[in-house]
Image: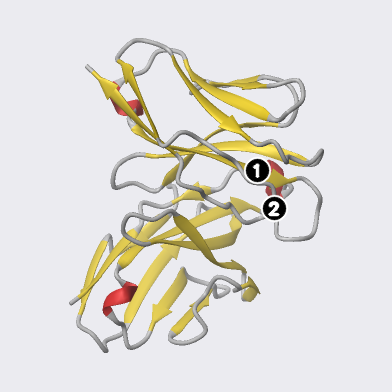
Amino acid sequence: DAKTTQPNSMESNEEEPVHLPCNHSTISGTDYIHWYRQLPSQGPEYVIHGLTSNVNNRMASLAIAEDRKSSTLILHRATLRDAAVYYCILRDVKSGGSNYKLTFGKGTLLTVNP
Amino acid sequence: NAGVMQNPRHLVRRRGQEARLRCSPVKGHSHVYWYRQLPEEGLKFMVYLQKENIIDESGMPKERFSAEFPKEGPSILRIQQVVRGDSAAYFCASSPRIGRPSDTEAFFGQGTRLTVV
């Protein structure tokens, strides 16, 4: 399985943008890039996913490098409620296999300062 | 719209007792997954079930653990003869029947925190 690499922790100030990087140099052409986050004492929560093009939703934006070897989750204005562990996960689009599994790494612990 | 409901939220068991964790998926979802998060560790896949079928239990310990998702009622993760090492947060997730798993988000419950004393 292709792996992802994320910084262990990042810090941000409230109301400022946050760019959370993820490296996935061994990504295959059929891997989707998914982001989940886990707030303290909560279950993981889906944030966003994409394949090749940049994606936007109400929570965040996902910027995917042209070679797809890295991606960046962008929180446009961090709030205290965005403090969480953010996970970057690859999921193979091919049917069959075990693409239903989410393989969580250690993620990035985001601290938001007031 | 109810999300994934897990109960109990907290469960304390003495060593040797049985633990039963319940998960009601999002209404209409027929795919259920269980994950375990040990203290200071990441979430690990345990089992994937569809109604009345276990599809993949490769992440389940071979002994004492079992899971079911009956035609009616919630999915149950059952741990027999619990030991201290079973203390963890257990999360259930569900996804809809329509759509490819790799292109479909999973909805997680708030978890059951099991403490074995």
Give the structural element (helix, strand or loop) at label 2: loop
- Crowd band around label 1 with a 10 angstrom C-alpha radius: few (<14), some (14–19), many (20+): many
State which chain disc 1 sits on.
A
Pointer 2: what residue?
Answer: A1
Q: Is B22 left or right of A20, judged from the image as shown? A: left
Both labels 1 and 2 in a single chain: yes
Indicate the position of residue A105 as horizontal and vertical percent values.
50, 48
Side of B108 relative to A68 (left or right): left
Quarter holding residue B48: bottom right
Residue toward you, B11 or B84: B84
| Residue A70 occupies quadrant | top right
Image vertical order of residue A12 relative to residue A81, above or below: above
Which mark's residue is nearer the viewer, 1 or 2? 2
Identify the secondary structure beneath mark 1.
strand
Q: Can the viewer see residue B1 in this picture?
A: no
- What is the quadrant of the N terminus of chain B in the image? top left
- Residue B26 in the image: x percent, y percent? 51, 52
Give the quadrant of residue B53.
bottom right
Q: Amino acid at mark 1?
A: Leu
Q: Earlier in the sequence, mark 1 or mark 2?
A: 2
Residue farthest to the top, as pictured:
A16
x and y, in percent, of residue B98 in the image: 71, 49
Residues B95 and B114: in front is: B114
Q: Residue at position x 66%, y 55% from top?
A: A100
As measured in the structure, the alpha-carbon distance from the residue carrying label 1 to the one carrying label 2 is: 9 Å
On screen, residue B45 above or below A54: below
Chain on which label 2 sits: A
Which mark is drawn over residue A90?
1
Q: CB under 8 Å between callouts 1 and 2?
A: yes
Task: Name the residue located 42 percent from the left edge and 12 percent from the top edge.
Answer: A17
Lateral position of residue A36 relative to residue A12, left or right = right
